[in-house]
Image (cartoon, rainbow, N blue to C red):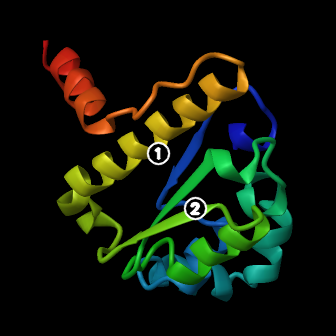
């Protein structure tokens, strides 16, 4: 939610994030028992949407330009459903959206691929910031070399 109120970050990545918190309870399979109890108590999706309005990222426009945002979704996520991710993508003016063939928990199997995508995104954001700040952009920036340097620093 910081991305909808703070324009200072140079980039924002939403990993398995959606537009609606109520949708997590009422659209996915994982919370069927909670959903059943809520419905038995007379609580329905519209109620949660209203009560949780301030907590739902899809109700707000991001403070960052869409070029500074990367959404990452799981094609088979039963918790943050693809429909919920697409609603956030629409609400945030269609920023970059990367899909992975995973569910919510199985996203861990794609950690390396997601990490590489994230690294590329952040390095490109840094290049964009350097060029807009009238600094000389790195000619022919080799992101694979930069990634290797970052990984080596992190291993130390």
Regarding residue 43, the answer to whether it shows in the image is no
Q: Quadrant of residue 120?
A: top left
71 is higher (above) or lower (below) than 106: above
Residue at (67% x, 50% y) in the render: 67
- Going by the picture, which residue comes out furthest to the top? 156
From the top left corner, tell me how far across and down residue 153 is, in percent.
21, 15
**Measuring 37% from the left and 40% from the top, which residue is drawn there?**
119
- The x, y position of residue 149, in whole percent, is 22, 22
Q: Is residue 99 left or right of residue 127?
A: left
Q: Quadrant of the C terminus?
A: top left
Q: Is residue 30 left or right of residue 70?
A: left
Task: Find out whether the residues at labels 1 and 2 contact each other: C-beta distance under 8 Å.
Answer: yes
Q: Residues within 10 Å of mark 1 (few under 14, many from 20)?
A: many
Q: Quadrant of the N terminus?
A: top right
* Residue 121 marker: 1
Q: Nearer the viewer, residue 62 or 39?
A: 62
Q: Residue at x 71, y 53 (%)?
A: 66
Disc 2 is placed on an element classified as strand
Rendered position, 122 above or below 110: above
Quadrant in the picture for residue 150: top left
Residue that mark 2 sits on: 96
Residue sitting at 81 percent across and 37 percent down?
5
Residue 15, position in %: x, y?
Answer: 47, 55
Say which mark, if any, is on residue 37.
none
146 relative to 94, above or below: above
Between residue 83 and residue 28, name the one nearer to us: 83
Q: Nearer the viewer, residue 141 or 51?
A: 141
């Amino acid at each position: 939610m910081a991305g909808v109120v703070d324009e200072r970050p140079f980039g924002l990545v939403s990993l398995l994030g959606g537009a609606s918190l109520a949708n997590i309870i009422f659209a996915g399979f994982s919370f069927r028992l909670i959903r059943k109890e809520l419905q038995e108590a007379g609580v329905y999706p519209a109620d949660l949407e209203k009560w949780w309005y301030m907590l739902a990222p899809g109700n707000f426009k991001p403070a960052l330009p869409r070029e500074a945002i990367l959404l990452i979704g799981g094609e088979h996520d039963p918790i943050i459903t693809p429909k919920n991710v697409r609603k956030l993508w629409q609400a945030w003016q269609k920023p970059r959206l990367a899909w992975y063939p995973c569910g919510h928990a199985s996203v861990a199997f794609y950690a390396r691929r997601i990490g590489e995508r994230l690294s590329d995104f952040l390095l490109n954001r840094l290049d964009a910031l350097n060029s807009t700040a009238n600094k000389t952009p790195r000619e022919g920036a080799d992101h694979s070399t930069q990634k290797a340097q970052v990984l080596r620093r992190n291993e130390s």
